[in-house]
Image (cartoon, rainbow, N blue to C red):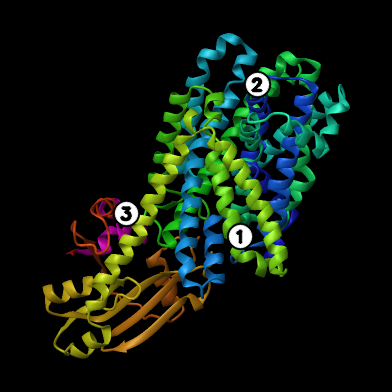
Amino acid sequence: MQNSRSGYKLLLPVLGVVFGDIGTSPIYTLRECISASGGSVSPDTILGLLSLVFWALTLVVTLKYVAFIMAASYKGEGGIMSLLKLASTQEAKLFEKKAWLSSIGIVGAALFFGDGIMTPAMSILSAVEGLEVVAPWLKAYVIPVALMLITFLFLGQRHGTHKVGRLFGPVMLLWFAVLGLVGVWNIMKNPIVMAAINPWYAFDFLRNQGVLSLRILGAVVLAVTGAEALYADMGHFGVRPIRLLWLVFVMPCLVINYFGQGSAILANPEIATNPFFLMFPQGSHLFVVILSAAATVIASQAVISGAYSLAQQAYQMGYLPRLILRHTSELERGQIYLPTITWSLYFGVVLLVLGFQSSSNLASAYGIAVTGTMLTTSLLYWFVAKRTLGWSMISVAAIVLVFVSVDVIFLSSNLTKISEGGWLPLLVGFGLFVLMSTWRQGRLNVINSVYPSKMTLDTLVSAIGVNQKLPGSAVFLSEPGEGVPNALIKSLNHYGRVHERLVILTVEPTEVPVEDGPSRFIVKDIGKGFQRVIIRFGYMQEQNVPESIREMEKLGLLEPTDAFSGYYFSRIRPRVGSIQDMPIWREFIFLFLLKNSSRAPDFFCIPSNEVVEFNMHV
């Protein structure tokens, strides 16, 4: 398994999925850096900016993520939620810290969703703005074309990315090759820009900028947007292909392109208004615009898919309610579609494009969510670094301190953008933090108030007489630790009898990505026709209950039956004021989320004609 993951055949898919976001940053990064530095295009400014970009890529992406963070995986998976699980596991004895760990993880997840709104708007708009280079009169069509591409992108989500996924790799291979080739072509005209590899140029440039250096760093961070995707997609492709591609191909192409833009600006300062497109030779601009649009759509798709995966993992860990989830591929479990997430992102992206009108205006808001997520990753990594690296605490502290210091500097520089639109991702992140933390707390409070007062299953079984049997079999779904399911109590009160064969089924999400084999099924015979069944699903798996029941019957763990009555559910409906230790305003939020969560039968892939559902008011 590991060999297949790390094989060379994965390099092209990795290129198409993992590096889309960071790979399209050259379209706008240097342009925004020059704007932040006051529009200066002197050699000292260009060399200083290039040096800052180079060392940002080196320190944040290569050193932090590729060399260190990616060494910390939870059962082979990466991403902020997996790192949270790993940190919680490592600190299990320090119970007091777990609330803080959870808060850090929720903040990181919330900011990642904020980034999911910003990236499609910023990337696609910056690419379509290349039409102005092709012909100035096309400027009027930038917004309509960008909205059209965004609409097509989100409409295509329900069909899944598996059909077009094969195109992603070749397109991105062509994209990075073009970045590198045009960069070399321009560097050859003015090779002095290669001196920017020396970090002294970055240090000396910032030293002479004073307070302006914060705005400049806020623009430099645009070069590393998408770095979190390298870690988030690690579970899909493995560590080796991502590391190999970054070090051997992606980073060299990016650096060469940035340096090529700097060389082109030194040769012709007038192109500083849009150095990426104007660095290409005349006659190629239309091709570059089309290729850029394709690359930014791919970059946006990667972010949207990441939001899907994060939402699924957040549900499995109890931070979000059930959402309607559809698998769009019979071969790839990771190909999922969540309508609620899709259209929430879509309307957010459209509002951003209409509200900001240009990628330069969006750049004022872009970066805060990215740097915030990076900081939460560094803080969580502190709790797992010692075991991951096997180093002394002093050595680990020194490494993590460097990461946190860099993240704090970049985050602080982006906070200067708050009044210019940076409040938006912070507002989105805060709203999502409130939703996720409220759902988790409300769910725990309801469970703690309802379950302890219920009778045990053994007590119910012992009280059931022989004459209290209905023909056939039924499955009653039970929450972990619930005891007698609410639906069973309602059914017994209604019919006065129970089925001859009755399965109490609990679906148990686990901390591993995928649960395979018979070991994920636990069957206990309680007597009098009652069976307690636990089915474990990994947090990356679709929770298909009927399919799992059929698998258990094939394995001989359950006896097949022809007289099946159906799957019985209960739907808890709390009233305002009934949830302990929660303010009224948070109760309203919790009840809204509960009301709009997907029905359990839909989530567990159970046909509607096999469902019997009871309402339970609390």
Give the image quarter of residue 253: top right
Q: Amino acid at mark 3?
A: Ser
- Residue ID for mark 3: 598
Which residue is nearer to you in this view: 588 or 101? Answer: 101
Q: Earlier in the sequence, mark 2 or mark 3?
A: 2
- Kindly indicate whether the residue at mark 3 contacts the one at mark 2 (C-beta within 8 angstroms): no
From the top left corner, tell me how far across and down residue 384 is, in percent.
61, 65
Left or right, residue 530 beside residue 517: left
Q: Earlier in the sequence, mark 3 or mark 1?
A: 1
Taking 36 as reference, is 324 above or below it?
below
From the top left corner, tell me how far across and down residue 122 is, in percent.
54, 31
Give the image quarter of residue 332: bottom right
Taking 584 as reference, is 520 above or below it?
below
Q: Circle 1: is it few (<14), some (14-19), or many (20+) Cα within 10 Å?
A: many
Q: Nearer the viewer, mark 2 or mark 3?
A: 2
Q: Is disc 2 placed on a helix, strand or loop?
A: loop
Q: Quadrant of the C terminus?
A: bottom left
- Residue ID for mark 1: 381
Residue at x 75% of width, y 41% of height = 55
From the top left corner, tell me how far across and down residue 188 is, in percent.
87, 25
Q: Is disc 3 placed on a helix, strand or loop?
A: loop
Residue at x 44% of width, y 62% of height = 317
- Please provide the residue range marked out in magenta: 591-615
Question: What's the CA distance linking mark 1 and mark 2?
Answer: 37 Å
- Residue ID for mark 2: 38
Question: What's the CA distance linking mark 2 and mark 3?
Answer: 51 Å
